[in-house]
Amino acid sequence: MLYAEITGWGKCLPPAVLSNADLTTFMDTTDEWITSRTGIEERRICHCNFSDMAIVSARRALAAANLDPAELDLILLGSLTMDSLCPNTASIIQDAIGAKNAASIDINSACTGFLYGLHIGTNLIRTGAHKKILVLGGEFISHYMNWAQRDVAVLFGDACGAVVIEATEERIGLLAAKIGCEADAKYAIQITNLGSAYSRLSEEFLYINWNFEGQEVFKRAVKCMARACEDVLHQLDLTTADIDLVVPHQANKRILDALARRVGIEEDKVFINVHKYGNTSAGTIPVALTEALEEGRVKPGDYILSATFGAGLSWGACIIKWGDRVTPLATTDAELPPCDKTALEILQPHIARYLAHEAKTG
């Protein structure tokens, strides 16, 4: 039987930091208001294209696996903030890294995009259809933010992460997964005026608006992720005591705490970096997994539990059994283009535009 080992991993965080104090310069909020409700202290703001972050994280993951990109036969990119809809952004990444023998697919399930991609890629390897796959997750969410909407704008940041999975006969990699969607609550997280269902001729198209029903999202997220965690534990006949580390979607510290309590996981087993980066949507899990490896939190043979939720409302969980190697086989000098602006300087034109629109429309 074939399995899909994670052989490489990498992350890319833009250098520009947007702190809670920065947000108070143009928004009616405080550091205490944000941290007490979300646990977020700062987030990163991208100064280039989303694909630039994806390419750097891809190159770092390939170096960690010591894999020639020409050996890849598939690229799966989880994101909702693509460089372009046509061509797909996975093909932009493919061309940039020289993965000339790969097929390339974009996956838009918002925050669940990476876990969905890992689930799909693993099963394609297990069927024998593919052997070496690059799975990415990330967002340039600041570009889609309404900076006049406090309840949404304080939550998100930009980042990307990637893993390489390769066929193996050893029973490691993603061993169990459960994904789903509570579509009856699809409008609880919604960009309300972007897409072919809306008029691109309207002036309102220039100003992205969000519907974000926080209490509904919290309730559904905890319930669905907990149920999915219980399902994957049951699939492998494991208990929470068998889990060595939890690497969940980093949406909100309150949600992470509530999930741990509901599933019965000790807090010290839960990897958290939401305070540093905010919610980077599809980027949270691969970035957190990479940081957990960098910090020595992942040991050979560990069972890693991951859970996620996002717009749709999509949700999922998986259990990964780690292999023997926890350090990269090689490194790369891949970096983002230089950034000579602060986060506020990058965002200033967007912030001014949204605040002016808010003042005009009330």
Image: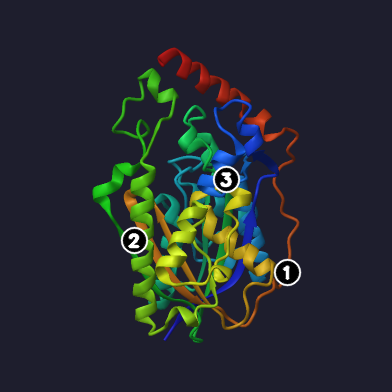
Q: Position of residue 236 (x, y in %)?
A: 39, 83
Indicate the quadrant where residue 70 lies.
bottom right
Left or right relative to 125: residue 253: right
The structure's colour scheme is rainbow
Q: Earlier in the sequence, mark 1 or mark 2?
A: 2
Residue for point 51% across, 41% down: 141
Q: Position of residue 350 (x, y in %)?
A: 56, 26
**Dot 1 amino acid type:** Ala
**Dot 3 amino acid type:** Thr
Residue for point 42% across, 83% down: 238
- Is residue 160 in view from this perspective? yes
* Number of marks drawn: 3
The CA span between labels 3 and 1 is 38 Å
- Which mark identifies residue 35? 3
Instruction: Say if mark 3 contacts mark 1, CB within 8 Å.
Output: no
Left or right relative to 296: residue 243: left
Q: Where is residue 149 in the image (x, y as percent from the top left)?
A: 47, 30
**Dot 2 amino acid type:** Cys
- Which mark identifies residue 224? 2
Residue nearer the viewer, 139 or 307? 307
- Which mark identifies residue 330? 1
